[in-house]
Amino acid sequence: MRAVDIIMKKRDGYKLTEEEIVFMVDGFTKGEIENYQMSAFTMAVFFKGMDDDEATSLTKAMLNSGDILDLSEIKGIKVDKHSTGGVGDKTSLVIAPIVASLGIKFAKMSGRGLGHTGGTLDKLESIPGYSISLTEEQFINQVNEIGVSLIGQTGTLAPADKKLYSLRDVTATVDSIPLIASSIMSKKLASGADAICLDVKVGSGAFMKNIESATKLAELMVEIGKKCNKKMTAILTNMDEPLGFAVGNSLEVIEAINTLNGNGPKDLLDICIEISAHLILDAGVAKSLKEAKDLALNQINNKEALNTLAKLIKAQGGDVAYVYDTNSFAKAKYITEVKIENAGYIKRIDALAIGNAAMKLGAGRAKITDKIDHSVGIILKQKVGDYVNNGDIIATIYANKEDISAEYNEILNAFSLSQTITTPELILKIVK
Ligand code: URA
């Protein structure tokens, strides 16, 4: 087999065999296939696509390039969730304790990655003492004991994906549906859960800008998961504004805790209940989605989910006082209100712009080596559909630097107004 023939075959629109795909991925991972050939290959896939079989073969080839977590020592059904990346997305901090408090095992390993705000791990690290580093044995024991653990990756999960993503990032081949689907699913499958719920974001702040492409991505990921014997759900959700009000690490943890206390923003609560319910249903703990949703809400109302979050924080070395008193979180030095300079209904809050502003404040990383400032961020005061008068406060900036004029303007410009009301739809579609 030669790489050039496989590239040519895909370039001309033919279906590749599993052997050909494995040849490309293995050769690339071992350094036997050069970056220039793999770049040509990903560009050919970008233009000619892949069918479900090819995308599944690509996923499996990347999955088999590294460690696959063996969670067989964990008793019961293991569930996991993944979001394709949204601004203000703190759903894991709410969903993990809800499902774990119902006896379903939530064992989640994540990478750190780059982002507008930190990932779930960075958010958890705003609680002093919380350790994201457990050995595989500690991880498994903790999930058996308290039902939940959220840690950084141990070992190497899907190293082929890591190498390929770096190449895609600089060759304009990230936004290809089969490449995204196989990249996400190789890592999810390596993490060993039985049931997986994917939150596929749609809108300006997301990879998928419209519902048609998001549906294709969701259907492909669900199909790949099913071919690998996983129970799969994908939920398409709107990302035409940030999720909830808080953007920034400790601010988001506080909002997640408020949600578990029954005082969360409606959009965040609705998404968390929907995703939790699908995991509860797939774990066989409820007979219908309605029953699963009632169960999830009940775990918030009876504080069982909040107490499970406290158990998680304690088990991983964090200070539990923060869960029961959010005033404990470190505060940013400078607080500035952003005022709107027009009147009307809010039509859109550009999530990407809000995320960028938060990153410039220090809430996220532009480079993997950047250090995160957990206390900074943005609290939105309005959501899409709200009416604002000229001079109304639309957001509060929490900063540790004095000059925030660039961030202020970016936030202001993120708001689009209209004279007619927009009613955003949050959950756009479910793919099972
Ligand atoms: N997230 C991933 O993990 N991979 C992609 O290709 C895109 C988003």
Image (spheres, rainbow, N blue to C red):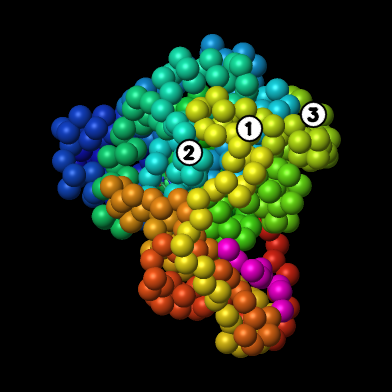
Q: Magenta part of the protein: which range?
A: 379-387
- In front of the other: 280 or 310: 310
Residue 388 picture location, percent across and down: 68, 81
Q: Which residue is mark 2?
A: 128
What SS does tag 1 mark? helix
In this rendering, the answer to whether 62 lies above or below 343 is above
At a point 76% along the width and 36% down the height, the residue shown is 303
Circle nearer the N terminus (1, 3) = 3
Q: In the picture provided, is 269 more to the left or to the right than 4?
A: right
Residue 165 picture location, percent across and down: 32, 45
Q: Can residue 88 be seen in this snapshot?
A: no
In this rendering, the answer to whether 283 lies above or below 403 is above
Is 268 part of what is drawn in magenta? no
User: Which numbered disc, 3 or 2, marks the residue closer to the eye?
Assistant: 2
- In front of the other: 53 or 405: 405
Tag 1: Cα neighbours inside 10 Å, few (<14), some, or many (≥20)? many
Amino acid on which the number 3 mark rests in the picture: Ala
Majority secondary structure of magenta residues: loop
When asked about the image quadrant of residue 291, the answer is top right
Amino acid on which the number 2 mark rests in the picture: Pro
Q: Which residue is mark 1?
A: 310
At a point 46% along the width and 14% down the height, the residue shown is 137
Residue 286, numbered circle = 3
What SS does tag 2 mark? loop
